[in-house]
Amino acid sequence: MELDDLKQNWKKADQQYKGEDYDLSKILTAKAGGPLDALRIAYKRQLIFLPATAAFLTFICLSDEALNYNAMIWSAVLMLLFLTYGYYRNYKLIQVMQQPVENGIKQKLEKDLQVLHYNVKKELILYRLFMIVFIVALEITMYYELVPSYKGWHDIIIPIRLTVYALLFVVQPYVTKYFFKQNYGQYISKLQELVDQAS
């Protein structure tokens, strides 16, 4: 009698495990409303916005002879293209993660999440590097070409400008992480939570 009860409990536990695994797959691969789909949409928006902005800035530079060699604008274009490439890689990864998996879904998602976390860390570092490049490009532009719109900033003495740049360098990581969490991080955390809860 006890052996029969043990077998029944074993079957129930096995069915419960399969049900949880199936539910995890269903939630993560959902085409609407799931955290993966929310991430896919967020990255897709950037894949439209960033290249469009880069194309617009390029058009402005090429159409105005005075801006043909504007270091700051061309640096911004380069930054936008680098970011577009990074978002594109994440977008393709999300598409792969949304494909149905019959076996080993947890192991596969853990591996994909590791790649996603690694890409995110690189992007945050790139934002920091881009800020430095942007500041240097701004100073170069003001040194070689006094653009009227930069005159107010150019007239400020260098020690004050350097102080402002230093403050930006300190504050930038916190601001970037905050906006990243609002747009992407919350969905990645939700994915990680779902995977961790899976048996």
Image (tube, rainbow, N blue to C red):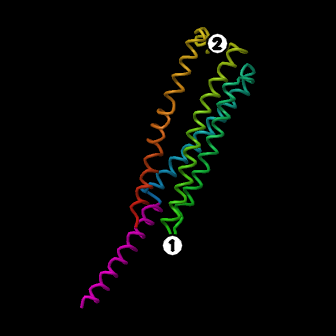
Q: Main secondary structure of the magenta part?
A: helix
Task: Give the residue type that dot 1 points to.
Answer: Asn
Q: Is residue 21 magenta?
A: yes
Q: Which residue is mark 1?
A: 103
Front-lying residue, 64 or 179:
179
Query: Which mark is drawn over residue 136?
Result: none
Residue depicted at x 43% and y 50%:
189
Residue extending farthest left: 1
Residue depicted at x 29% and y 89%:
3
Callout 2: SS: helix
User: In this picture, is 170 found above or below 125?
Assistant: above
User: In this picture, is 99 found above or below 50?
Assistant: below
Instruction: Write down the region rendered in magenta.
Output: 1-30
- Mark 2 or mark 1: name the one nearer the start of the chain: 1
Side of 41 where 56 appears, left or right: right
Q: Which residue is mark 2?
A: 148
Q: Position of residue 36 (x, y in %)?
A: 48, 55
Q: Check the picture and name the quadrant holding the N terminus.
A: bottom left
Residue extending farthest front: 2
Q: Is residue 6 magenta?
A: yes
| Residue 136 placement: quadrant | top right
Residue depicted at x 69% and y 19%:
141
Q: Alpha-carbon neighbours of circle 2 within 10 Å: few (<14), some, or many (≥20)?
A: few
Task: Give the residue type that dot 2 points to.
Answer: Pro
